[in-house]
Amino acid sequence: MCYFHVSCVLQVYPPEYEGHFQSLMITQKEIRDRIKVLAALIHDDYGNERPVMVCVLKGANPFYQNLLEALQDLKHGYTMEFLKASSYEGNASTGTVRVESVNFEALEGKHVILVEDIVDTGTTLAHVIPLLKEKCNPKSLEVCTLLEKRLDTPPLVQAKFKGFSIPNHFIVGYGLDYNELYRDVRDIWVISQTGIDFNPSALYS
Ligand code: IMP
Ligand code: MG
């Protein structure tokens, strides 16, 4: 137990993750600064319109919360919706996308902004976007992603609002997971081989 926190070593991630990261990619501060810019772009673009901000769970959740906070600072109104989409197993895109828990009615005829953590191949959004267009006929539908990976081939979907373009590494933290771990880390890191090989059940035995 540490009583005098000035003498404590400050850890930037839970100690059980020691060795699981290869390198730091983007700090929490850099993320927050960039989010302010994205919110300003949305504010400028949408004027008096109130977009429906749709969080693509689970990974985008921290980004979504911070983006909404930045919109609140600008006094830009919005409504909130969530959907769950998954295409990854471990660190490989499966190509099959599952979409769950969408309130289609809430998006009908509205300006919709899909808030994503990362666009990798674009497979997830290439599935979600036509589905939403077909089921809810939104007034407009744009994507705001925190990250976009630079791959040899461009992603299937282009986001209108992008936070960072990153090299092709598997990254974790700030909501991004590997087998459900590392969402609880505040910065974004490149995962190490130790992290990839780690068996999550070891944390709960
Ligand atoms: P896509 O369908 O290939 O564009 O992949 C998009 C989804 O896969 C994202 O929303 C993430 O949930 C997940 N994903 C892609 N790359 C990474 C990564 O480097 N780390 C963690 N999750 C990722
Ligand atoms: Mg995602």
Image (cartoon, rainbow, N blue to C red):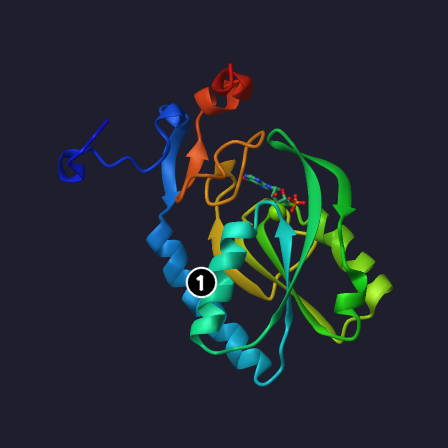
Percent x, y of residue 41: 50, 74
Residue picked out by circle 1: 35
Q: How many marks?
A: 1
Residue sitting farthest toward the right: 134
Question: Depth check: 174 or 87 in front?
Answer: 174
Tell me the quarter of the image containing the N terminus: top left
Under 8 Å from ligand 2: the CB of mark 1? Answer: no
Vertical position of residue 118 compared to residue 108: above or below: above
Q: Position of residue 83 (x, y in %)?
A: 70, 53
Q: Secondary structure at mark 1?
A: helix
Q: Residue at x 18, y 38 (%)?
A: 5
Q: Is residue 154 in view?
A: no
Q: In the displayed structure, does residue 34 sit left or right of residue 120? A: left
The residue under the point 40% across, 27% down is 17
Q: Is residue 197 above or below residue 174?
A: above
From the viewer's perspective, is residue 21 above or below residue 95?
above
